[in-house]
Image (cartoon, grey):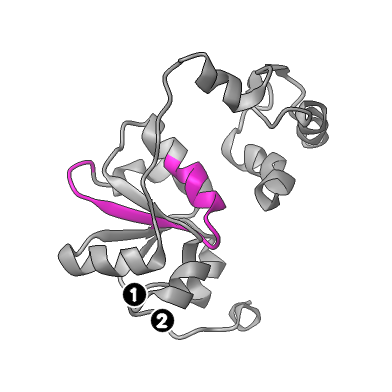
Amino acid sequence: RVLFRSFAMWVGEMISDINQAILLVTEPGREEECMIRLSRVGYDNTIGYLEGGFSSWKQSGKEIDTLKRISGTELDEWFKKEQVLLFDVRKKSEFDSEHLLHSVNIPLNQLNAKLDSFPKDKSFVIYCAGGHRSMIAASILKQRGYDNFVDVTGGFNEIAKTSSLPKTEYVCPTTLL
């Protein structure tokens, strides 16, 4: 639900051409609301929607892709086996407030410009605050041919509760202004 409320903002962040044709794949019954939300931020070129949403795509037998997601606890186990690279796709201010040591901050809205930061020959982990932005990042990375990464379910919020990986000291975001 959080992602749905902010999806139009993320379209604005990620698609710079307001004339880009958009085909919606949404929950059945939400098509009109999605078009209105997009229109409010200047995206008036919605060419239609997939009848029945993603379920109809899957039922048609068309190709789909999946993503491996792990918990904060699984991240610890994985990290013990292999010193994987960690990528935090939250905003810089969120990252500066607290993050996993040795993680690299590449905010979601800068991902396309910094694709060369992600290795194609080595495993890595992506995370955000709650798991929504990292799913968008994962979709972009998959589309660009990356298949050597996992996403952390629940993002940094989950990691902070369940992982023993070292984190920076928390700094209240208002002190960073």
Residue 160 coordinates in the image, percent (x, y): 46, 75
Q: Magenta stretch containing residue 132, yes or no? A: yes
| Callout 2 crowding tier (Cα within 10 Å): few <14, some 14–19, many ≥20 | few
Earlier in the chain: of badge 2 and badge 1, it is: 1
Q: Amino acid at mark 1?
A: Leu
Q: Which mark is residue 15?
A: none
Q: Which mark is residue 101?
A: 1
| Callout 1 crowding tier (Cα within 10 Å): few <14, some 14–19, many ≥20 | few
Q: Is residue 111 above or below residue 170?
A: above
**What residue range appears in magenta?**
120-138
Measure the C-alpha gap from mark 2 to mark 1. 6 Å
**Picture quarter containing residue 91?**
bottom right
Residue 142 coordinates in the image, percent (x, y): 38, 35
As helix, strand or loop, the secondary structure at mark 1 comes to: loop
* Residue nearest the viewer, comparing 177 with 80: 80
As helix, strand or loop, the secondary structure at mark 2 comes to: loop
Q: Is residue 1 above or below residue 112?
A: below
Residue holding disc 2 = 168
* Residue nearest the viewer, comparing 55 with 16: 55
Answer whether labels 2 and 1 touch (C-beta < 8 Å). yes
Q: Amino acid at mark 2?
A: Thr
